Amino acid sequence: MTRRQVLKVGMIGGAGLVLPWKLKLGKAYAVPQAAFLNDPEKIKKFLSPVPDALYPSFIYSPVGMGSGRVPHYEVGVSAVSNQFWGVKELPGGGTTRLYTDIYGYGMDDAVGYTWPGRTFEVQSNRPIQVQWINNLEPNGGHLFPVDETLHWCYSLPGYTRYSLSADGVPIVVHVHGHHSQYRADGNPEEFFTYRWRVKGPRFRGRTSIYDNSQPAGNLWYHDHALGITRLNVYAGMAGFYFVRDDMDTGLQGNPLDLPAHPYEKAYAIQDRMFRTDGQLFYPAYPGDPAYEGFITDEGVTLHGEPNNEFFPYNPNNYSDDTVLWDGGGPTALAEFFGDHMVVNGRAWPKEDVERRNYRLHLLNGCDSRFMVIRFRLARLTDTTIYDTQPVLNFDVIGSDQGLSSEIKTVDHLVFEPGSRYDIIFDFKQAPFGTRVIMENIGGDVPFNGLFGEDLDEDEDFFENRQTDRIMAFDVIKTLDTSILDVSPTEINFGPNVGAPDRYRKVALFEGSDEFGRLQPLLGTVGPATDFIGRDINWPNTQPYIDAGLTGPMEGAIAWHSPTTENPALNTTEEWEVWNGTGDAHPVHLHLVHFEIVARYEIEWDSATNEEDRVLDPDGITTDPPVGDGTYLVEQPVVQHNGETGFGFKLMNWEDGVGDEITDIDATSGYVENARHDMVTALPDQITVIRARFDKPGRFVWHCHILSHEDHEMMRTLYVGPETGSR
C-alpha cells in the first residue's frame, strides 16, 4: 500500500485497497481504449494554423461605458456546435475536417463564441466592468456526465431541488491572477444559471468590477463553478486576460524592447480526448479509460445499481444502448490525461514564423498534466520527435503575473497546470525552411518531479504516445525588415513582497471520501488560529462529534468546513506548504501574488517507509515513532453531506523540517523569479511562499489540478474578520 492507496479503511469499514496504478494509468491514456474513441495517431500533425489569441479583432471591445465612466463589457457563454479543431486521416485515404460541440465565451457578433474565449487587453490601474451572461439554455444536461455525488452547486442546502435538465448549467467566472475585490473573484458558490434563473448563495450581482490594480501580466479567465469546474473548463470556458502598463505596453517601440504584435503570441495548451465523430469525450463510466484504475481496482462502491434512477445505461456503449450496466457512474475520477494536445482549440497546430525574436505567452490549461517544455530543430516535414534533433535554448522573462527579476536562459521548463510563462524564442537559431517543434518531455502520469529520460522505464508506455509534441513553428516567412528585430535586456522586475508579519503552515493530503474514492485534501500543520491568534475549533455539530473531531482544527479538512486560513488585513504571511502526498500539486492562491522563497525536505520519522509515511502501514506491528521526524496518522474527514471519509494529519511536525533544497532552479527546469500565483509543491517537500493580503473578504486557495479542486482540494482564504462578506 502506498500513499496513493492510503485507503486503509479503518474508519469507513472496508477491505484494504491496494494496487500501484501510476504506470497503468499512463498506459490507459497512451492509446485509445475503446472503439468509440478517436485515435490520436490519425490526426494530421502541424497542418492547421493556430488561432492568434492576440489578433486585434480577437480582442474584446467594450460595448459602452458603465457607471463612473468605466468601460463596460458584456461577455456570454453559449453552446457552439461547429468548433473546428483538427484534420483526420480517413481509412480509405484522404482527410476530413473535425468539428465539436463546446461551451464558448464570446458575444453575439461576427466572431461569436469561441474556444478559447476572446482575449481581454486592459490597462493597469484602469478599471473595467464585465457583465457575464449565461446563455446555456436548460436542454437536458451538460455536455459531459456530471457526478452529483460530489460537493457541487446543486448539492448545497436549499439547492437540491434544482436540476441540470430543468434549471441549466451553473457557471461563474474567475479571472485567474487578478487582484480583485472579493465581490469579483469568482467564488465557486457565486454561480448562476441561464438568465440568472438560479443564483448561488454567494451571488454578488450581474456585473463584476475589475480594478486592474497590478502591473502588466498574463492572466486568464475560466469557469470556477463548485464541483463542475473541470467539466466547464473542459467544454471550452477559458481565455486570456492581459494587463498592460507603461513599460510592458504590448506595442511596437515599448521601453523594454519586447516583441509586440505580430511577433507576440499567446498559446493556451490543453489536453483532450475525442470520439470518432469528433465530439469531446470525458471519462466517467465503467469501461471508460482510467475508470478501472481509479474505481474498480480500488474497490470503490458507488451509488447506483442496474437500472438506477440516475443513468439506466452506459451512454458510451454504442453497440447496444439498451444494455443495462452494473452501476458505478457517472463518477469523477481523481485525475485526467488526454491523448490529444490542443493549442488555442486546435489539435497539434502550427505557426509560420520569421527568423527573428518572438514573445510567446504559454498557458497550461490542462486538468492534471504537468508539462516539461523543450524546443527541437526539425525538418519541415517532420511530425515526430527524434533524439537526433538539436534542442534549442530560449529565454524565460516572466511568469504568472509579470516580468522576472532577470532573464533566465534554459533548454527546458517545468510547466504546471494553471501557470503561465513568458518566453522569448529566437527563431534565428533555425535555418530558413526548417521547423521547430515544441516538445513535451513530461509524462501522461501524475507528476512527481520526474520527466524525460527518468520516465523511460516502460517502453510500451512511450511506443504510441502522441503527447510528446505540442505544436510546430515553420520558419518559412520572409523577414519584414520594416519592423526591428528586438530582444529585451533590461528585465529587472520580479517579486518584492517584503518581510513577513506571520508564519503559517498548511498541508496537502490524500484520503478517501465516503465511497472509498481517492480524495485529495488541503489542511493545516498543527492547530489552526484566526487572524488575531485565537483557536479555530471544529464545529460543535453532530457529524463532527460523531467523527470524534473536537477542539482546534488541524490536519486534512474538506472545503465546506470552517475557514482556517484567515490572514489579518494588510499583513504579509509566509506559508510553508507541506506536501504529504506522493505527487506534485500546483497550488494557487486567489487575490495575491507571491514570492517563492525556498524549499526544504520533509524529515520523516524513520519508523515510516518511503511509500507509506504512516506508522504501522500494514496493520501488523505496533512500532512506536522513533521521534526523529514527522509522520502521518489517520483522521476522519466530514464530507459535505455529513458522511465521513478520512484523511491524515501530521504528527511531531516540529521535527519535520529537513535540509534546504538548493538544486531546484532554472537548470533543473524551474524558473521562479517572478510574481507568481502558482507554485509546484513537490512530494516530500516543504515549499515556502510569501504574500501580502491587502483586500478584505472571502477568497479561496486550492490545487489547480481541476479534478482535485472539484473533489475538495480547495479551502476558503478569508482576509480579516469574517463579517458581512461571508
Image (tube, rainbow, N blue to C red):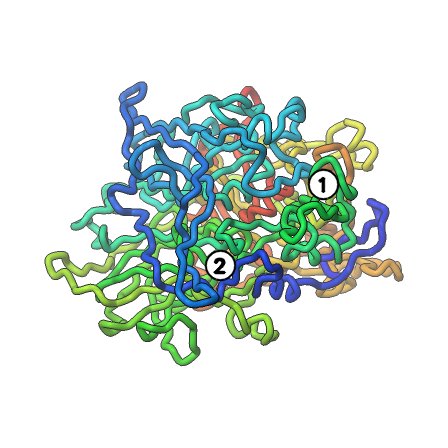
Q: Position of residue 533 (x, y in %)?
A: 62, 33
Which residue lies most toward the left here? 482
Q: Which mark is residue 340?
A: 2
Residue 600 visible here: yes
Q: The residue under label 1 is which amino acid type? A: Pro
| Residue at the (64%, 43%) spot, across then down | 711
Q: Position of residue 393 (x, y in %)?
A: 34, 69
Which mark is nearer the camera, 1 or 2? 1
Q: Quick one: 303 or 90, which is closer to the camera?
A: 90
Residue at image position (18%, 61%) is 485
- Residue at image position (49%, 38%) is 223
| Mark 1 or 2, nearer chain start | 1
Kind of residue at badge 2: His
Q: Which residue is mark 1?
A: 312
Examine the image and state in which quarter residue 714 appears. top right
Is any part of residue 680 visible from this angle? no
